[in-house]
Amino acid sequence: MKLLVVEDDPETSAYLVNGLQEEGHLVDHATEGRDGLFMALNNIYDVMIIDRMLPVLDGLSMVRAARAAGNKTPVLFLSTMGGIDDRVTGLDAGGDDYLVKPFAFAELLARVNALGRRPALTEVVTHLRVGDLQMDLFKRRVTRQGREIDLQHREFRLLEYLMRNAGRVVTRTMLLEAVWDFRFDPQTTVVETHISRLRAKIDRGFDHELIRTIRGAGYSLGE
Amino acid sequence: MNLLRSHGFRLALLYLALFGTSVLVIFAVIYWATAGYMAETLDLSVDTELSSLADIDKSSGRAALIAAIRDRARVPAGRSTYELLLDPLGGKLAGTLPTRPPRIGWQDLPLPKNEEGAEEGDMMRARGLLLPDGSFLLVGQSAFQLRETREVMVRAFGWGMLVTVVLGLIGGVLMSAGMLRRVDSIRRTAQEIMAGNLAQRIPTRGTRDDLDLLAGSLNEMLDRIHALMEGMRQVSSDIAHDLRTPLTRLRQRPELVGGRATTVGEYQALVDTVLRDVDEILKTFAAMLRIAEIEAGTARIRFVEVDLSTILRSIVELYTALAEDQRQSLVGRVEHGITVRGDRELLTQMFVNLVENALRHTPAGTRIELTAELAAGHPVCIVADSGPGIPPAERAKVFRRFYRLDASRATAGSGLGLSLVAAIAGLHHVIVDLTDNKPGLCVTLRFPATGKHEA
């Protein structure tokens, strides 16, 4: 993917740019909001990663300006820790996702990947398929190798999210947000519990596992 | 502060100037109207006299005119009309005025000095008329009354103005002195606070006037600032005391393990541990900042109507599986349609912390209940468990930052979970009670009556 990183702190931006390049992304970098806006409007990016606090033009204003100019590139905001209302204002300004510093790189990567291949809103999907696992969103039926799997409401949504993001890493907080609409960092293994229950239903008794645990990051569904 | 430079006094002066100007304008209008009217009356009276004498001359002849003029001159003192009749050659025929060259029309002439009350320089208003035979008739009337009236008016106005200015100045001084005293007391308080006496407050009189209300608001603001500063102080001392341990550990581990490690695997393990330690510290840090920010209360401006029932149901649903895996049970009894004004994310965090606390600090077999109902319009939520509970003496302390019961020191956690609960509850005006569940702990959260509380 082609990414734009707008971050003024040299250490953080080096950390971001190097990390993302190692993952095979093409990364452009700007150190202040006005340059960032200029680059955003003159290039086509898959995702923009923008710090809230930037010199010359702050991140919020930069995204507002880009949105006003018709730019629809997904934006991931970065903000300093503690901020409790930053998320709302960030999303209001036209951001698509939000991450509070300090963050684990795996979390950032997972979110950037999720944003980058976000399907267009107009696209209506009725069937999802990953390997021998099939999901009928219309009839709310899940089958693997033709065998029907009975899932509860949340389990269905959990699997749906994993399938929509098949092949990509999704983190625990991403799952909490997508499936339960909660935004907090659990101090317990609550997400793991749900994943292991889902695993018991879709992986137990089959020759290979579809849900894989990615150490230090989250989970990934794939063959 | 200098009285004459005070705002109140300047205001009084400005008002005085404005008032004085309007008085001046009113006087000018009255003066011109009155004086003009009197001058007109005078002219009219001169005219009437002149034409009546001219009529006598015309109808009864010159002798009658001379007789009439002499007649009029005999009227005793106090009269103010003067006549002069000259023959065509300029000789005086009759009249009380001295002979003078004939001039036709309106004129202002010096007044003969025989009139009572008249002064040097007083004038009379006169009109000269040429009679058909070429003789000259002049009639004049003293204008000294007009002059006197004008003087009286100017004098009266002058005094009035003087009194106004003096009263205005006295009023201004009194008013601004009172104001100044109270402003001075505010200023003195501010200076004392700046000097370090943070407990100082502005004295109020209890009169509930504007300055009193201002002083009250300032005092409330000072209280708030004081509380915020206390919070800051608390946070910094917390950081000093409670981050030292993990930071020390962070430093010691690489030193100890790093000295012994020889393989890549051992170093890798060390890096992982260090990363975990740092993450813990950062998490604690973020939690402290979050608490401080919540306690600052600014989040209230973003409060919206939040569906508490749905949040609580979701929490129960989310954690039931975990409870089952730990051989505990989580039961939710949540009434439908309970809404409160608040911040959805923070309220979620508050209940999650309570439920996670119960799940983490109680043994297998514990039953945890989350109930929510409306009691007389107040949403009341209870998180109760049948675990070991908290001794009564410790209950008040668990909301303190980093406070941990001895029994739970071994379990992971920053010791900030309940502080965060207390901060969020405070932000939402929720009263939190810890009671004995016999056995176990019962946390009761009483929300303010729905729809009635504003931030």
Image (tube, helix red, strand yellow):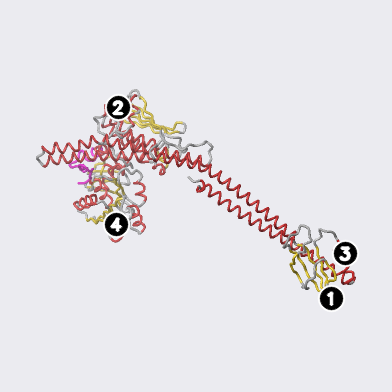
Mark 1 lies on a secondary structure that is loop
From the image, tell me which residue sits under label 3: B71
Q: Position of residue A107 (x, y in %)?
A: 25, 45
Q: CA distance from mark 2 to mark 4?
A: 55 Å
Please tell me how crowded label 2 is: few (under 14), some (14-19), or many (20+) other residues with Cα within 10 Å. Answer: many
Q: Give the residues in magenta.
A: A197-223
Mark 3 lies on a secondary structure that is helix
Q: Which mark is residue A36?
A: 4
Judge from the rendering whether residue B164 lies leftward or rightward of residue A93; answer left or right: right
- In-front residue for pair B347/A140: B347
Q: Which mark is residue B132?
A: 1
Q: CA distance from mark 3 to mark 1?
A: 23 Å
- Letter of the chain that mark 3 sits on in the rendering: B
Sequence-first tag of 2 and 1: 1
Tag count = 4
Disc 2 residue type (three-letter): Thr
Q: CA distance from mark 3 to mark 4?
A: 112 Å
